[in-house]
Image (spheres, helix red, strand yellow):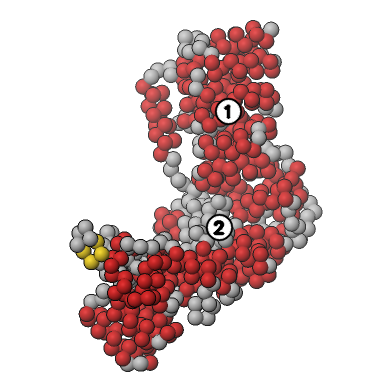
C-alpha cells in the first residue's frame, strides 16, 4: 500500500489527542516524503508530537489549500500553526500566503491599529493552545494591555513578526510609534511595508553592525537600500553592492555617486573580477575609465576574464584588447566594447567621465566604441564646445531618460543593462491614484498593480473581490495576489468529478467488502483531497469514522494495530479492521 493512502487511514484512526499518531510515529516518519501532504488532523498531531525536521518535511509536501484552510481553522497551538505555515512558504509561497489572507483579514477586523489589543495579543501568544482565530479573538475581547508594546521573547519572535507583517500596512504604520525600536528594525529587515520616513529613522538609529546586517538582508525594501546608501559609507555600500538580492537601481546609485562617496576596494574588485553582468554593468555610471570599460566589455566573445581584459586595456589601450576578441575559427574580429542599446546609458557614461576626468576621457570612450559616424560626430561636436557642449549633453541625456527603453525580443548582443538609471524619473503612484479617482481602474488592472511594491490602498481595494494579500513573509519586495491557480489540483478535481459522474457507485467502493484495502484507501484519499465540494469530503470522512467505530470501537489499541498493519496489508478494509480487533483482544 502506498503510504499516501496509509496516512489517510491514519488520520481517520487518530483521536482528538493524536495518541494513535504518537504510538506509530516511529514507523511512519521515514515515509513522510512519500505523501503529497497530510490531512489537517494528522498535521495537528504532527505539530503536537513530531520533531522540527518532520514538520519541515511535511510542510514541503503540503500544497492542498483545502487542507491548509482546515489546519488554520482547527489546529493549535497558534504559535506552532504559524510556524508550520512559514515552513510551507519556504517551499511554496502560495501555500503560506493564501491561508494568511484570512489571518490578515481577521487582524484588520478585530485588532486594527489598537496598540492595547496588540499588546494583549503578544501576552497571550506564547501560551495560547487554541487556534490562530481563537488567539486573535481573545486578544480583541480582552481587557488591559499597554500603549507601549513590549519586545517579544525569543521563543515567539518569528511568529510575532509574522503577525505584524500580515496586518494591513496602514495599521502597521499606526502601530510603529508604540513598538520598541528593535521590533521596528526587525520589520525593516524583513521587508515590512512601512513609510519611508520610518525606514530612514530606523536605519539612522541602527548600530554599524545592524546596518551591515540590513545591507546584506534578503527582504530589504528599496526604501531601506536608499537609506543605507544615503549614509555615504563606502564599506556599507560595498555590502549593498555585493547583495544578490539588491537590484540594478541600488548598484547604479552607488556607482553614480562615486565622485562624492569613493568606492570601497571590495566593490572595485567585485566589478573587475566578475563575469556576472549584474555586478559589472552598473559601473557604466561610475565615471572611472577602467570600470566603465569593464561594464561595456563584449563578454560573449572574450578570450580572457574581465579582470584580465581591463588590465590589458590599461597597459595598451583598445589595440591590446583586440586579440582577445578575435575568433580564429570563423576568422572574425569583434569589437571589444558594446554600445548600450539605450542611448541614455551611453550619454550618462560620457557625462560622468567628462565631469570626473575631463573631456579627453569622454572623447577616448567615443573613439573606442563602435558608434555610427553621425552619432560619433555629434558627440565630438559637443566635446569641442566646452562647457556649453556639456550643458547640451546633459539636456539630451535627460530627454533620453524620459523616453521608453527600446525593446528587442532577440538582441544581437545580450548586454544585461537594466533601465534603472540613477536619475531616471519614475511614474508615481500619485498619478495612478489621481487617474483612479477620476475613472476607477478595472478590477483586473487593480489586481495586477497590487503585485508591485508600495501599491496604494485605494488601488488595492479596487480589485474585483477586495481579496488581496500584500506579500510579506517570505515575499521579498513583491506583493502576491491570492488567486493563484494550482493546475494539478484543478485537473485532479475535474478528473474525479468526471469519474464520479461516469462510474455509478464509485464513492461506495471505499466501503465495499470486495475492494482491496489499498484501492479503497487510495480512492478515499483522493476524495479527501480532490472532492468537487468540501461537503462531500466531510460526508465521506464522517462515514469512515462510523465505519471504524463499528469495527474497532473506541479502543486505542485496536486502532494502533490497524495503523501499523495498514502499509503492508493485502486484504480488504473490513478484513484489516477485523484482524486488528482480533489482535487487540
Residue at the right extreme of this rendering? 144
Q: Nearer the viewer, mark 2 or mark 1?
A: 1
Question: In the structure shown, which secondary structural element does the residue marked by tag 1 occupy?
Answer: helix
Residue at the left extreme of this rendering? 331
At horizontal 53% and vertical 53% (from top left) the residue drawn is 475
Query: How many marks overall?
Result: 2
Q: Quadrant of residue 414?
A: bottom left
Q: Is residue 6 visible?
A: yes
**Front-lying residue, 67 or 86:** 86
Answer above or below: position of 469 versus 241: above
At horizontal 35% and vertical 68% (from top left) the residue drawn is 297
Query: Along the polypeptide, which appears first: circle 2 or circle 1?
Result: 1
Q: Position of residue 316 (x, y in %)?
A: 34, 76
At horizontal 61% and vertical 70% (from top left) the residue drawn is 200
Answer above or below: position of 329 versus 316: above
Q: Quadrant of residue 486?
A: top left
**Front-lying residue, 575 or 416:** 416
Q: Position of residue 224 (x, y in %)?
A: 57, 66
Q: Which mark is residue 30?
A: 1
> Is 411 left or right of 565, judged from the image as shown?
left
Q: Which mark is residue 281?
A: none
Q: Which mark is residue 219?
A: 2
At horizontal 73% and vertical 53% (from top left) the residue drawn is 152
> Is 232 left or right of 496, judged from the image as shown?
right
Quadrant of the rendering where the C terminus is positioned: top right
> Is 40 left or right of 331, judged from the image as shown?
right
Question: In the structure shown, which secondary structural element does the residue marked by tag 2 occupy?
Answer: loop
Q: Quadrant of residue 208?
A: bottom right
Amino acid at each position: 500500500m502506498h503510504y499516501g493512502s496509509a496516512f489517510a487511514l491514519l488520520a481517520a484512526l487518530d483521536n482528538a489527542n493524536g495518541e494513535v499518531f504518537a504510538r506509530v510515529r516511529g514507523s511512519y516518519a521515514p515515509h513522510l516524503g512519500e505523501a503529497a501532504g497530510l490531512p489537517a488532523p494528522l498535521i495537528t498531531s504532527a505539530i503536537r508530537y513530531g520533531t522540527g525536521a518532520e514538520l519541515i518535511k511535511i510542510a514541503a509536501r503540503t500544497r492542498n489549500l483545502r487542507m491548509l484552510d482546515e489546519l488554520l481553522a482547527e489546529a493549535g497551538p497558534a504559535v506552532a500553526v504559524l510556524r508550520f505555515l512559514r515552513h510551507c512558504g519556504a517551499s511554496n509561497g502560495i501555500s503560506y500566503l493564501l491561508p494568511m489572507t484570512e489571518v490578515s483579514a481577521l487582524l484588520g477586523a478585530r485588532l486594527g491599529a489598537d496598540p492595547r489589543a496588540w499588546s494583549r495579543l503578544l501576552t497571550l501568544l506564547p501560551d495560547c493552545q487554541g487556534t490562530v482565530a481563537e488567539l486573535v479573538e481573545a486578544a480583541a475581547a480582552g481587557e488591559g494591555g499597554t500603549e507601549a508594546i513590549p519586545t517579544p521573547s525569543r521563543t515567539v519572535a518569528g511568529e510575532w513578526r509574522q503577525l505584524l507583517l500580515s496586518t494591513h500596512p496602514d495599521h502597521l504604520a499606526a502601530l510603529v510609534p508604540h513598538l520598541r525600536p528593535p521590533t521596528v528594525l526587525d520589520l525593516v529587515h524583513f521587508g515590512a511595508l512601512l513609510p519611508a520616513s520610518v525606514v530612514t529613522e530606523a536605519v539612522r538609529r541602527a548600530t554599524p553592525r545592524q546596518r551591515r546586517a540590513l545591507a546584506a538582508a534578503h527582504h530589504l525594501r528599496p526604501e531601506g537600500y536608499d537609506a543605507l546608501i544615503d549614509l555615504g559609507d563606502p564599506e556599507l555600500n560595498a555590502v549593498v553592492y555585493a547583495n544578490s538580492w539588491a537590484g540594478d537601481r541600488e548598484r547604479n546609485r552607488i556607482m553614480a555617486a562615486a565622485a562624492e562617496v569613493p568606492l570601497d576596494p571590495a566593490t572595485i574588485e567585485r566589478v573587475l573580477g566578475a563575469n556576472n553582468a549584474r555586478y559589472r554593468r552598473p559601473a557604466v555610471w561610475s565615471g572611472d575609465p577602467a570600470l566603465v570599460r569593464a561594464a561595456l566589455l563584449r563578454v560573449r566573445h572574450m578570450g580572457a576574464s574581465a579582470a584580465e581584459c581591463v588590465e590589458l586595456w590599461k597597459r595598451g589601450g583598445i589595440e591590446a584588447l583586440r586579440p582577445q576578441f578575435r575568433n580564429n575559427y570563423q576568422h572574425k574580429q569583434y569589437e571589444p566594447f558594446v554600445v548600450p542599446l539605450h542611448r541614455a546609458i551611453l550619454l550618462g557614461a560620457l557625462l560622468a567621465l567628462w565631469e570626473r576626468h575631463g573631456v579627453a576621457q569622454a572623447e577616448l570612450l567615443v573613439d573606442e566604441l563602435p558608434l555610427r559616424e553621425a552619432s560619433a560626430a555629434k558627440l565630438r561636436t559637443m566635446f569641442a564646445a566646452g562647457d556649453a557642449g556639456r550643458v547640451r549633453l546633459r539636456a539630451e541625456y535627460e530627454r533620453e531618460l524620459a523616453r521608453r527603453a527600446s525593446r528587442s525580443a532577440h538582441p544581437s548582443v545580450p548586454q544585461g543593462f537594466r533601465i534603472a538609471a540613477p536619475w531616471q524619473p519614475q511614474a508615481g503612484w500619485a498619478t495612478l491614484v489621481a487617474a483612479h479617482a477620476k475613472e476607477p481602474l478595472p478590477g483586473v488592472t487593480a489586481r495586477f498593480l497590487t503585485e508591485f511594491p508600495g501599491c496604494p490602498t485605494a488601488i488595492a481595494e479596487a480589485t474585483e473581490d477586495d481579496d488581496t494579500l500584500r506579500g510579506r513573509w517570505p515575499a521579498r519586495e513583491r506583493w502576491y495576489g491570492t488567486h493563484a491557480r494550482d493546475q494539478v489540483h484543478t485537473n485532479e478535481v475535474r478528473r474525479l468529478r468526471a469519474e464520479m459522474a461516469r462510474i455509478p457507485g464509485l464513492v461506495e467502493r471505499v466501503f465495499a467488502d470486495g475492494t482491496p484495502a489499498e484501492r479503497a484507501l487510495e480512492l478515499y484519499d483522493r476524495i479527501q483531497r480532490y472532492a468537487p465540494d468540501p461537503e462531500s469530503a466531510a460526508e465521506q470522512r464522517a462515514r469512515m469514522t462510523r465505519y471504524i467505530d463499528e469495527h474497532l470501537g473506541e479502543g486505542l489499541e485496536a486502532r494502533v494495530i490497524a495503523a501499523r498493519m495498514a502499509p503492508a496489508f493485502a486484504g480488504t478494509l473490513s478484513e484489516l479492521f477485523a484482524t486488528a480487533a482480533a489482535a487487540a483482544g
